[in-house]
Image: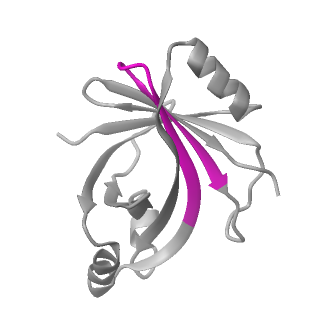
C-alpha cells in the first residue's frame, strides 16, 4: 500500500531557533539546503483540484519526482495517500503529461534542508514568494506521518510580502 500522509501546520517564529532546537534534540543535518522547483498539473476544468487530488512534477537538486496525492480524508488533520516515483527526465515527463491532456497550473519553488536523528526526519522548507501566491503568515510547520512506521516533519518558512 502506498504511504499515507498526514499534514499539520504550525506557526514558527524563527528557522534559526528551530535549527538550534533540532540540534539540541539530537538531530543532525542530513541534507544541506537544496533548491526545489515544483509544478502542479491538471486537466481542463481543474478536474484533479475539484476532486481534491494533486499531480506534481518536482525537481529536487538534480532529482526529478512525479507525485500523485489522493483526495484528503476528513478528520482533524489532512490525511491522504501519496504515490510517487523518481523519473529520469523531467522535460520528457512534462511532455508526456501534456500529451495526456494535463497542463501546468501552478509553479512554486523552495529551498529544503533535511534533519534526522536516525529515527525520524525533519524537513525545513524556505518558500520563495511568487506573484502567484498570496502569503499571509511568516512560518508554517507541516508534519507528515508516512505509513507504516516512518514519521517526519516538514517545516515551511514563508516570508511575508
Q: Specify whether 4 is left or right of 122.
A: left
Q: Position of residue 61 (x, y in %)?
A: 44, 57
Q: Position of residue 79 (x, y in %)?
A: 41, 38
Farthest-out residue, right: 161
Q: Tell me if residue 74 comes above or below residue 82 in the rendering.
A: above
Q: How is the image coloured?
A: one colour
Classified by dominant secondary structure, the portion drawn in magenta counts as strand
Q: Residue 107 falls in which quadrant of the image?
A: bottom right
In the image, what residue occupies the spot 64% across and 53% down? 127
Residue 158 lies in the magenta stretch: no
Residue 118 lies in the magenta stretch: yes
Which residue occupies the foreground of this view, 61 or 141? 61
Q: Position of residue 53 (x, y in %)?
A: 39, 58
Q: Which residues are magenta?
A: 108-127
Farthest-out residue, top: 25
* Viewport quadrant of the C terminus: bottom right
Q: Position of residue 57 (x, y in %)?
A: 38, 65
Q: Tell me if residue 128 comes above or below residue 137 in the rendering.
A: below
* Viewport quadrant of the N terminus: top left
Which residue occupies the foreground of this view, 48 or 31? 31
In the image, what residue occupies the spot 70% across and 61% down? 129
Q: Specify whether 77 is left or right of 58.
A: right
Q: Residue 103 falls in which quadrant of the image?
A: bottom left
Q: Residue 52 falls in which quadrant of the image?
A: bottom left
In the image, what residue occupies the spot 38% across and 26% down? 151
Q: Specify whether 39 is left or right of 161.
A: left
Amino acid at each position: 500500500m502506498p504511504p499515507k500522509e498526514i499534514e499539520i501546520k504550525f506557526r514558527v517564529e524563527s528557522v534559526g531557533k528551530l535549527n538550534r532546537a533540532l540540534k539540541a534534540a539530537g538531530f543532525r543535518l542530513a541534507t544541506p539546503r537544496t533548491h526545489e522547483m515544483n509544478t502542479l498539473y491538471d486537466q481542463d476544468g481543474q478536474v484533479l483540484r475539484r476532486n481534491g487530488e494533486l499531480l506534481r512534477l518536482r525537481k529536487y537538486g538534480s532529482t526529478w519526482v512525479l507525485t500523485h496525492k489522493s483526495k484528503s480524508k476528513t478528520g482533524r488533520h489532512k490525511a491522504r495517500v501519496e504515490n510517487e516515483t523518481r523519473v529520469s527526465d523531467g522535460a520528457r515527463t512534462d511532455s508526456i503529461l501534456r500529451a495526456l491532456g494535463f497542463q501546468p497550473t501552478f509553479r512554486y519553488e523552495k529551498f529544503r534542508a533535511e534533519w534526522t536523528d536516525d529515527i525520524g526526519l525533519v524537513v525545513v522548507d524556505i518558500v520563495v514568494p511568487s506573484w502567484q501566491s498570496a502569503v499571509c503568515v511568516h512560518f508554517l510547520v507541516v508534519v507528515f506521518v508516512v505509513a507504516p512506521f516512518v514519521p517526519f516533519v516538514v517545516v515551511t518558512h514563508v516570508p511575508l510580502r
